[in-house]
Each structure stands twice: as C-alpha cells, then as structure tokens.
Amino acid sequence: MNGSALNGLPVDHIAIAVSDLESAAALYERVTGAGSSPVEELPAQGVRVCFVGALELLEPLTEESTVARFIEKKGGGLHHVAYRTDDIRGELSRLADAGFQLIDREPRPGAGGHSVAFLHPKSTGGVLIELVQHGE
C-alpha cells in the first residue's frame, strides 16, 4: 500500500552534492558510524553515487551534469529530499493534478535499480524533491 494513503510519503533519503565522493563518504562514515554502499556510476544522470545510511552522496561525472552546475552555483551541500512511494506513476499524476511542476513526467532509472522522478523546485518552495519507487 502506498504510504500516502496512511501518513503521507515517507522520506527515503537526503541527497548531498559533493566534489569528492570518497572523501565525503569517509566523513559521513565517521559522523554516523555506518559504512557506505559500493559506488555506482549513473552516466544517464551524470553522477557517481553512494549511500551512507539514509544519505545519498552525489559526485558529478562531467562538468556539464546538473550536479556539477549545482556545485558551481551553490557549492556542495543539500541537493534534494527523496520520498518513497509504491506507485510513482500514480504520485506523479496526483502531484501534477495538484499543480506541482514535474521535471520528469515519466519515471527514469535511479541508483540501486529504483525508479525516480523529480519535482521542480519552483513549485516546491525552492527544494528539489525526488520520488523513489524501490525495485522489486
């Protein structure tokens, strides 16, 4: 059952844009006491990614990636908040009907084989929001 039917969408993870994935992973491992996941490259998204607990660390693969532009403009730091859903297409439809601006009208592949879609910060109070549907 979709979490929104009961208590709203649960937070899946918080993403942080970083310039050096290995250094950032080591830092957050020390802070949290958790180990990091293996590094995954997502060329379609233009990032290398790993998780330390519920933190997703994003390092740009190229200077043209959206994460590279984010770091250039704002410096490293909070990139997006991700909410988990069991029905990403249904949530995209619900949110579009509610007036939110969708970056992705259809889900795309994300880290760990999950499906993801983003809402534009212009319609969410300045915060990039990701919807995540975990793979089977």
Image (tube, helix red, strand yellow):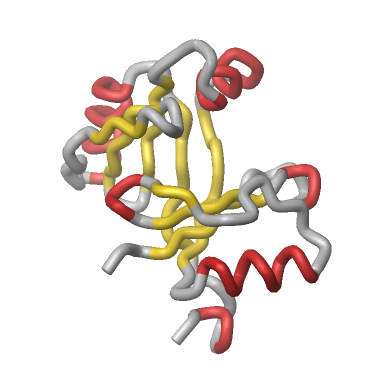
24 relative to 14, above or below? above
Q: Work out which quarter of the rendered image holds the C terminus and state it.
A: bottom left
Residue 83: x and y in percent read 51, 61
Residue 8 falls left or right of residue 60: right
Image position of 28 (left or right of 109): left
- Determine the residue positioned at 49% across, 11% down: 63
On the rendered image, what quadrant is the N terminus found in?
Answer: bottom left
Judge by depth and name the residue closer to the eye, 106 or 74.
106
Inspect this view and state whether residue 30 appears: no
Q: Quadrant of residue 122?
A: top right
Q: Would you place residue 21 above or below residue 35 in this image?
A: above
Residue nearest the viewer, comparing 130 with 126: 130
What is the count of numbered marks?
0
The image shows residue 135 at horizontal and vertical percentages of 31, 63
Which residue in the rendered view is the most extreme toward the front?
106
Q: Residue at x 61, y 70 (%)?
A: 91
- Residue beneath the point at 29% across and 31% down: 41
Q: Position of residue 130 (x, y in %)?
A: 55, 52
Q: Is residue 83 above or below residue 60?
A: below
Residue 34 seen in the current view: yes
The image shows residue 21, relative to residue 100, as above or below, that is: above
Q: Residue at x 64, y 54 (%)?
A: 105
Position in image of residue 35 (x %, y %): 16, 43
Outermost residue, right side: 99
Rendered image quadrant of residue 96 = bottom right
Of residues 101 and 51, the one drawn nearer to the viewer in this rendering: 101
